[in-house]
């Protein structure tokens, strides 16, 4: 029995090239779990996590009242206890198409929008429905590890292009040109950025579109943080450039409405010129949806009202809190010599921060820093290696300001204790 199980298990692991310790095997949830396990039971009570982008635990990040009412009403109506079409309820697809069309120079059709179980499933749909033997995909570094994990399961080769911290985390487009070949299915951009907190300008997005057009590859635009921009640059959806190059837009309610547990996302084809969309590919995507299941029907049914009736004051409040907490975060980073932030966040909920190990006497790398910090200070921060950048860390600032101040204060004490400078200065 045991050897049989082992055989099957190994087959699966090897088949998916998910050998342990390979970077494809690192997930944010996995590493945060290990960091938490490293904290003593008595200290667990005082844990502050700046690790995961889920601010729903803080009362200041409460979702909009209309969102809750809408879900209660659709649930109580008893009209949405059955299955929905696998691609999503027609009214939900229409609402998503209309919501995204508000910011586009053309109108999306309900047939362009597919309802997914969060943005996570939209990522899987994009990669799984495009893959073919020998295919590769271009992913940003630093990035969001679900893409690497999904690619590994689908036998999709990953090629990384760098995001450039000195240029506000813009895409290294020369690298993209050098990496792409006739087997490249697309390039992924995440805007507003996770893990970097950057927001791309209209001009940069246009350059990305023109590069992708030249290379004949799609742009997969992860806009799960869409509209969560609070800096100089307004949020511009990649779909604006859909007539230059076909764009697959991935999004969800999770971040803008602060309800990641509702598992409601979308996969949307922006292709006003019909370059990508042909009956065969659409058929393939629809077939793939038949094996997914999708989110709960009553949540889908609540979407039209949520997208149409959420008040501007709710969005403004969230943006204000995020701006304020990112300011607090950056100010506190400046007080801790061993960490520096090359680019102040302008959107999303996280920022990449560089570690200066030469100021620390007994810390070997970002993983060591985060594990010791968790153990000694009960503060959880994500090691940069998890998102592809060694000796950096990702700080999530979507946290109540008192917790953020307390956590950063503890990072400061940690620095003083491990500093190799006299008195830690
Ligand atoms: C949170 C996140 C996702 C996943 O979104 P869900 O709707 O929670 O599945 C995808 N991409 C990025 C960049 C994210 O930060």
Image: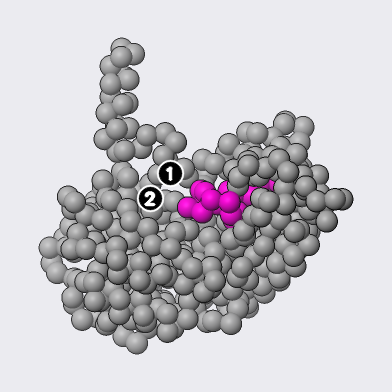
**Mark 2 vs ligand 1: CB below 8 Å:** no
| Placement of the C terminus among the 4 image quadrants | bottom right
Depth check, mark 1 against mark 2: the one in front is 1
State the residue at coordinates (63%, 71%).
344
Tell me where residue 120 appears, x and y as whole percent: 41, 54
Horizontal and vertical percent position of residue 109? 27, 76
As displayed, is residue 91 above or below residue 44? below
Q: Nearer the viewer, residue 143 or 247?
A: 143
> Residue drawn at (51%, 48%), measured in percent from left and top?
386
- Tell me the residue that label 2 is attached to: 148
Q: Nearer the viewer, residue 235 or 196?
A: 196
N-terminal-most mark, 1 or 2: 1
Work out whether residue 94 can be spotted.
no
CB of mark 1 within 8 Å of CB of mark 2? Answer: yes
- Magenta stretch in the rendered image: 379-394
The crowding category of the residue bearing disc 1, from other C-alpha atoms within 10 Å (few below 14, some 14 to 19, many at least 20), is some
Residue 135 showing in the rendered view? yes
Task: Residue 19: say if magenta.
Answer: no
Q: Residue at x 29, y 66 (%)?
A: 178
- Residue appearing at x 18%, y 63% in the figure: 182
> How far from the left and from the top, in percent, is residue 92?
36, 67
Q: Position of residue 14 (x, y in %)?
A: 29, 32
State the CA–CA distance, disc 1 to disc 2. Answer: 8 Å
- Of all residues, the one furthest to the left in this rendering is 280
Which residue is disc 1 drawn over?
23
Left or right? Give the position of 419 relative to 368.
right
Q: Secondary structure at mark 1?
A: helix
Q: Is residue 380 magenta?
A: yes
Q: Is residue 256 left or right of residue 207?
A: right
């Amino acid at each position: 029995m045991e050897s049989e199980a082992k055989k099957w298990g190994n087959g699966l692991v090897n088949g998916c090239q998910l050998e342990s310790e390979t970077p494809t095997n690192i997930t944010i949830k996995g590493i945060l779990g290990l960091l938490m396990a490293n904290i003593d039971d008595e200290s667990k009570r005082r844990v502050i996590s700046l690790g995961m982008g889920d601010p729903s635990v803080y009362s200041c990040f409460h979702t909009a009242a209309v969102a809750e009412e809408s879900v209660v009403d659709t649930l109580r109506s008893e009209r949405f206890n059955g299955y929905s079409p696998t691609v999503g309820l027609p009214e939900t697809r229409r609402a998503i198409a209309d919501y995204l069309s508000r910011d586009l120079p053309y109108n999306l059709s309900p047939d362009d929008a597919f309802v997914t179980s969060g943005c996570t499933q939209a990522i899987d749909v994009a990669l799984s429905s495009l893959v073919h033997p020998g295919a590769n995909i271009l992913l940003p570094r630093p990035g969001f590890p679900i893409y690497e994990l999904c690619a590994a399961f689908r036998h999709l080769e990953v090629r990384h292009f760098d995001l450039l911290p000195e240029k506000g985390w813009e895409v290294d487009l020369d690298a993209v040109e050098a990496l792409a070949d006739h087997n490249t299915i697309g390039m992924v951009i995440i805007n507003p950025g996770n893990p970097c907190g950057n927001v791309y300008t209209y001009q940069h997005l246009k350059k990305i579109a023109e590069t992708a057009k030249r290379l004949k590859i799609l742009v997969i635009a992860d806009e799960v943080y869409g509209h969560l921009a609070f800096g100089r640059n307004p949020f511009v959806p990649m779909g604006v450039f859909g007539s230059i190059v076909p764009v697959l837009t991935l999004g969800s309610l999770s971040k803008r409405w602060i309800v990641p547990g509702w598992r409601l996302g979308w996969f949307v084809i922006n292709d006003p010129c019909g370059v990508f969309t042909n009956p065969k590919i659409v058929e393939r995507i629809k077939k793939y949806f038949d094996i997914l299941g999708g989110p709960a029907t009553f949540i889908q049914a609540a979407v039209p009202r949520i997208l149409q009736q959420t008040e501007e004051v709710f969005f403004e409040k969230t943006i204000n809190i995020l701006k304020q907490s990112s300011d607090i975060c950056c100010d506190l980073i400046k007080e801790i010599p061993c960490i520096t932030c090359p680019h102040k966040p302008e959107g999303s909920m996280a920022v990449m921060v560089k570690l200066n190990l030469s100021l620390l006497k007994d810390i070997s790398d970002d993983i060591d820093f985060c594990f010791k910090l968790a153990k000694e200070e009960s503060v959880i921060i994500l090691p940069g290696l998890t998102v592809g950048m060694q000796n950096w860390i990702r700080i999530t600032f979507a946290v109540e300001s008192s917790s953020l101040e307390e956590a950063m204060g503890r990072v400061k004490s940690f620095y003083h204790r491990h500093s190799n400078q006299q008195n830690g200065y």
